[in-house]
Amino acid sequence: MYDILIIGGGPAGLTAATYACRAGKSVLVLEKAAFGGQITWSPRVENFPGFLSVSGNELGDKLLEQAMEQGAEVELEEVTGLEKTNGTWTARCDSGAAFEGRAVILAAGAHPRMLGLPREEELVGSGVGYCAVCDGAFYKGKAVAVNGGGNSALQDALLLSESCSKVYLIHRRDAFRGEQKLVEALEQRENVEFVLNASVTALLGEEELRGVLVEQEGRSREIDVDGLFVAIGHQPDLEAFGQWLDRDKAGYADSGEDCLTVTEGLFVAGDCRKKAVRQLTTAAADGAVAALAACRWLDR
């Protein structure tokens, strides 16, 4: 029996583990894929306090090392459901394993919706990205494409247009879904080109992206770019825990900055929580808030 079970081993979950252990609680972190979360996809991170530049893998390793040094235990397990009996939580895993705790912090994260193209995962970090705020600076003076038609895609294109030589904004419809003011701002940028009624059908290049193949109104077009930012939305990894949470229309945990949920003893942190900004720093901040909230609840 642990004091706190943390589901998710990204920046939010590992920060929560560090804070909870420092408060004297026993902690188990359950992670289904790789400790460090999606940041491990990034070859360079330059926007995390205290590091001029660090690889995502190295940063993930440091977060894990810090949590374990404070006393956290970790397991590579995919949690498929939560149960609560007489005040005790049980996390059941796809392997058949089960772990018990007095409180739970959900830091399961959210994954970007992918295009589903061949070699897309291989090229993540080598030209294909999902966060222009995180990785856009690496393409200064280069040509890039953004795929999407909502506010996120429009904002990414605006950000990239400030430093990139050319930005192609590719959208499968003839009009954008995002705010008209953003569209008008992009129309004023000479280095932005709208590619409408179009879909990316192939990624070009071997070890690194060198372009995209686009199907536009029945014709194929090859566009030379060094980077492609996919901005077609995210999906929170909360399907297994929906009965314990209120969620918004997009499926994110409907929790405020206090990281509390409608279920006593259950807290939420990181990208799976409803929020305006999803960055490393905000995930870490959530981890600290959720851990301290869980500790206060246990000590009440």
Image: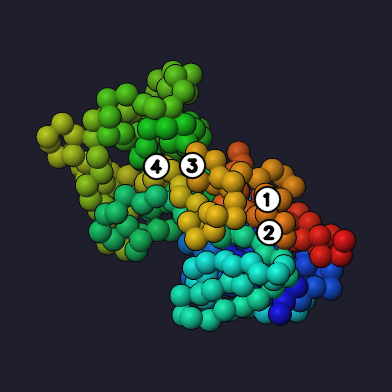
Quarter of the view holding residue 213:
top left
**Residue 261 badge:** 1
Q: Which residue is drawn at 28% across and 29% down?
A: 173
How far is the residue under mark 2 from the one under mark 1?
6 Å
Whether residue 59 is visible to the viewer of this picture, yes or no, is no
**Residue 232 badge:** 4
* 173 w.r.t. 250: above or below: above
The amino acid at mark 2 is Leu
Q: Which residue is drawn at 36% across and 51% down?
A: 114
- Sooner in the amino-acid sequence: mark 4 or mark 1: 4
**Residue 159 badge:** none
The amino acid at mark 4 is Ile
* 98 w.r.t. 135: above or below: below
**Residue 250 badge:** 3
Could you say where residue 164 lies in the image, as x and y percent from the top left? 44, 38
State left or right for residue 292 relative to residue 233: right
